[in-house]
Image (tube, helix red, strand yellow):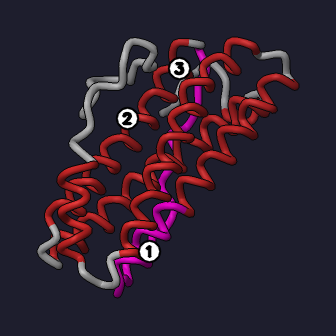
């Protein structure tokens, strides 16, 4: 995205990190599609559903940040995505990857909030509060799923049953959910 306003070099540290977070969120979305497709290929539709939904959620997070930047007249170049992992062999490895990714994203949002506060960008800090709370839920969700996978002793049908019963499909984010740039897909 190019504009005559200001280039990325004129952005505050907070805004540069937000643009970088757009990249992280789109990369996470791609990673979750890869995980979901692997589960789909293994005929594990409930696990596939969870990760397809996670992919859409990460995409929406990126678009929320894009909307925030646009609403604040921040001009920036839309970043590409990083390389993702695609060589999978075991369910546990995929869920552990998802948990690591969610913990990393939590750390990224905590850092963003600190930088916003250090720069006295209180609007930016307030914007991040929803994401920080969302990450608490996402880490807990993936931690639980990893525990269930570990306790299943390799019986993935037990995992599928748990997911179908205790991890229903995602619903709308609620009234405090930031808006997205363009329509939300989740």
* Badge 2 density bin: few <14, some 14–19, many ≥20, Cα 10 Å: many
Specify start and end residues of the magenta stretch as a single range.
73-99
The residue singled out by tag 3 in the image is 68
> What secondary structure is marked by label 1?
loop
Q: Is residue 94 magenta?
A: yes
Q: Position of residue 52 (x, y in %)?
A: 25, 53
Residue displayed at 27% across by 54% down: 50
The residue singled out by tag 1 in the image is 85
> What secondary structure is marked by label 3?
helix
Q: Earlier in the sequence, mark 2 or mark 3?
A: 2
Spatial CA distance of label 3 from label 1 is 29 Å
Q: Earlier in the sequence, mark 3 or mark 1?
A: 3
* Badge 3 density bin: few <14, some 14–19, many ≥20, Cα 10 Å: some
Q: Which of 41 and 5 is in front in this view?
A: 41
Q: Which of 13 and 5 is in front in this view?
A: 13
Spatial CA distance of label 2 from label 1 is 21 Å
The residue singled out by tag 2 in the image is 60
Q: Nearer the viewer, residue 34 or 161?
A: 161
Spatial CA distance of label 2 from label 3 is 12 Å
């Amino acid at each position: 995205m190019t504009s005559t306003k200001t280039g990325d070099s004129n952005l505050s540290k907070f805004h540069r990190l937000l643009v970088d977070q757009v990249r992280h969120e789109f990369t996470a979305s791609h990673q979750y599609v890869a995980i979901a497709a692997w589960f789909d290929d293994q005929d594990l539709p409930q696990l596939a559903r969870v990760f397809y939904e996670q992919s859409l959620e990460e995409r929406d997070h990126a678009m929320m940040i894009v909307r925030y930047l646009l609403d604040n007249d921040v001009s920036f170049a839309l970043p590409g995505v990083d390389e993702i992992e695609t060589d999978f062999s075991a369910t546990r490895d995929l869920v552990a990857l998802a948990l690591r990714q969610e913990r990393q994203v939590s750390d990224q949002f905590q850092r963003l909030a600190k930088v916003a506060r250090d720069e006295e960008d209180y609007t930016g800090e307030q914007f991040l509060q929803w994401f920080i709370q969302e990450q608490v839920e996402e880490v807990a969700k993936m931690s639980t799923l990893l525990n269930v996978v570990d306790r299943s002793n390799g019986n993935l049908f037990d995992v599928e049953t748990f997911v179908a019963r205790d991890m229903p499909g995602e619903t709308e984010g609620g009234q405090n959910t930031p808006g997205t740039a363009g329509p939300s897909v989740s």
